[in-house]
């Protein structure tokens, strides 16, 4: 079992280059199922989740060429199977994002139900509500934990769909299915994350007719077919936030290159409230926390453009090290405080009112401990805490981290961190 060891590293300093966004690349790759033509996706990070998506596509019949680093070329001449692989779906929930494209291209998809995960039940009712609104028949086989979705006799037909929650995945799945439905589809209360806009940009390059992605009402005029394209994924705003917090928690200074400031406004705002100096420069985002008295602040996670839930745990690790009490509210997932137990092993003294509210007393001198990465982002939070804890922090279950951060250990080492990966 591989682990990450982190020693107290002092202030980090230097430059880091942000990789392509995991949460953009996954739907982008899924969308390429909808055309026989060659698609080229660029700035693809080398992640476990990307490997799972490549395998999902290959199982459906896609030729995937990943011979050139950072670039994936796909062509789906024909669909050979419409069944999602259970193991792959269990391994990565985002495998679900192939449902919309398969419905649009092939008219049918059989998908094992994804289990919940540590952060919540993660139902797919809104995805299925959208498919039904487009005229598809949805059969949920609880016994076999499989859902079969089939387009109606005349294919998918556009309609108005209201999302009870601005779900990122449901917005993306419905958006992709609607691109080749007959007539007009309106998605109301749609998710507004930058990854939605990136996906819409790819689809429009392929010949789709999508308007106002990035707002809470997206309009799609269905088209007969989609063609190939070349598209570069947006940089990863969550990785960007993680390295901003690395500068803040170690009281160092880091220039974060290839980052888009417009995608991380809440993180910039909150770190500035803590008296961290942040400059938006042409070459990137410069975060400077040297020789400054930092302050506590409160955070409340919300769908974009609110404070991102994926940065909640790394930010909480940082709040442990500033003087003053902070309140953290998690409104997006029902169980995303698993990292509290792990931070408390390091002396954080965090108390949770329930699974949605935590009180961080702050001003704590963290000490090294054996901790677990309880989810992808909590793993990053443990690395951050380990950088400033006295002694050594040993992080297990690091497969979570490797799902979503490209070469995290290497990038931290280059900034002066005393960190290494070991095989137990
Ligand atoms: C995406 O997950 C991201 N994953 C998550 O990032 C991110 O945390 C999340 O959006 C919120 O921003 C990818 O893009 C691959 P949701 P997704 O549907 O689409 C409820 C990471 O660390 N819901 O917006 O699954 C759901 O239970 C990962 O990179 C329903 O009730 O998130 C949750 O409480 C973690 N019914 C809330 O909505 C549904 O049909 C938000 O989920 C769908 C969702």
Image: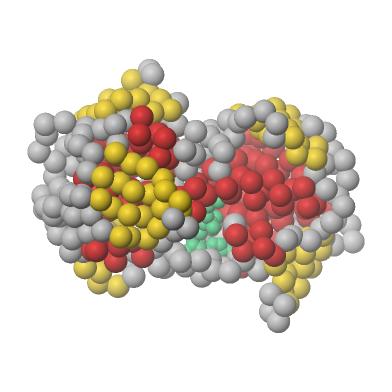
Residues 96 and 208: in front is 96
Identify the residue at horizontal 42%, vertical 35% (top origin): 410
Quadrant of res 62: top right
**Residue 267 in the image: above or below residue 354:** above
In this image, 238 relative to 28: left or right? Answer: left
Identify the residue at horizontal 18%, vertical 42% (top origin): 274
Residue 114 rendering spot, x and y as whole percentages: 62, 66
In this image, 85 relative to 388: left or right? Answer: right
Identify the residue at horizontal 11%, vertical 34% (top origin): 292
Residue 288, can we see it?
Answer: yes
Residue 390 rendering spot, x and y as whole percentages: 18, 49
**Residue 298 in the image: above or below residue 231:** below
Residue 27, can we see it?
Answer: no
Q: How is the image coloured?
A: secondary structure
Quadrant of res 95: bottom right
Q: Quadrant for the C terminus, please.
A: bottom left
Residue farthest along the bottom direction in this orientation: 143
Residue farthest along the front direction in this orientation: 424
Quadrant of res 223: top right
Residue 159 rendering spot, x and y as whole percentages: 71, 56
Identify the residue at horizontal 42%, vertical 40% (top origin): 408
Residue 401 rendering spot, x and y as whole percentages: 45, 50
**Residue 363 in the image: above or below residue 285:** below
In this image, 197 relative to 313: left or right? Answer: right
Residue farthest along the top direction in this orientation: 282
Residues 207 and 141: in front is 141
């Amino acid at each position: 079992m591989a682990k990450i060891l982190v020693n107290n590293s002092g202030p980090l300093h230097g430059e880091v280059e942000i990789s392509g966004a995991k949460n953009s690349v996954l739907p982008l790759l899924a969308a390429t199922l909808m055309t026989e033509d060659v698609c080229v996706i660029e700035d693809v990070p080398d992640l476990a989740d990307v490997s799972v998506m490549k395998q999902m596509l290959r199982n459906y019949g896609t030729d995937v060429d990943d011979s050139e680093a950072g670039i994936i070329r796909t062509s789906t001449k024909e669909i050979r199977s419409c069944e999602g692989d259970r193991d792959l779906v269990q391994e990565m929930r985002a495998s679900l994002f192939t449902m919309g494209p398969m419905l649009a291209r092939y008219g049918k998809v059989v998908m094992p139900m994804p289990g919940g995960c540590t952060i919540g039940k993660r139902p797919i009712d809104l995805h299925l509500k959208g498919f039904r609104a487009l005229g598809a028949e949805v059969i949920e086989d609880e016994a076999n934990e499989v859902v079969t979705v089939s387009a109606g006799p005349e294919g998918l037909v556009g309609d108005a769909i209201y999302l009870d929650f601005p779900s990122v995945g449901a917005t993306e799945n419905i958006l992709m299915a609607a691109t080749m439905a007959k007539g007009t589809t309106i998605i109301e209360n749609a998710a507004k994350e930058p990854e939605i806009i990136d996906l819409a940009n790819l689809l429009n390059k392929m010949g789709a007719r999508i308007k106002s992605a990035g707002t809470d009402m997206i309009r799609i005029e269905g088209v007969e077919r989609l063609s190939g394209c070349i598209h570069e994924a947006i940089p990863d705003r969550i990785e960007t936030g993680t390295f901003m917090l690395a500068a803040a928690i170690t009281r160092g200074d880091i220039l974060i290159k290839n980052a888009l400031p417009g995608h991380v406004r809440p993180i910039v705002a909150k770190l500035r409230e803590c008296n961290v100096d942040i400059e938006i420069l042409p070459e990137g985002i410069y975060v400077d926390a040297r020789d400054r008295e930092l302050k506590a602040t409160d955070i409340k996670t919300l769908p974009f453009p609110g404070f991102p839930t994926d940065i909640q745990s790394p930010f909480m690790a940082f709040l442990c090290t500033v003087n003053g009490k902070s309140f953290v509210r998690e409104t997006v997932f029902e169980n995303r405080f698993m990292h509290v137990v792990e931070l408390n092993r390091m002396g954080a003294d965090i108390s949770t009112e329930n699974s949605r509210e935590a009180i961080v007393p702050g001003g704590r001198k963290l000490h090294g401990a054996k901790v677990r990465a309880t989810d992808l982002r909590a793993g990053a939070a443990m690395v951050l805490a380990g950088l400033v804890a006295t002694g050594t922090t040993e992080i297990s279950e690091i497969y979570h981290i490797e799902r979503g951060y490209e070469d995290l250990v290497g990038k931290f080492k280059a900034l002066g961190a005393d960190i290494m990966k070991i095989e137990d």
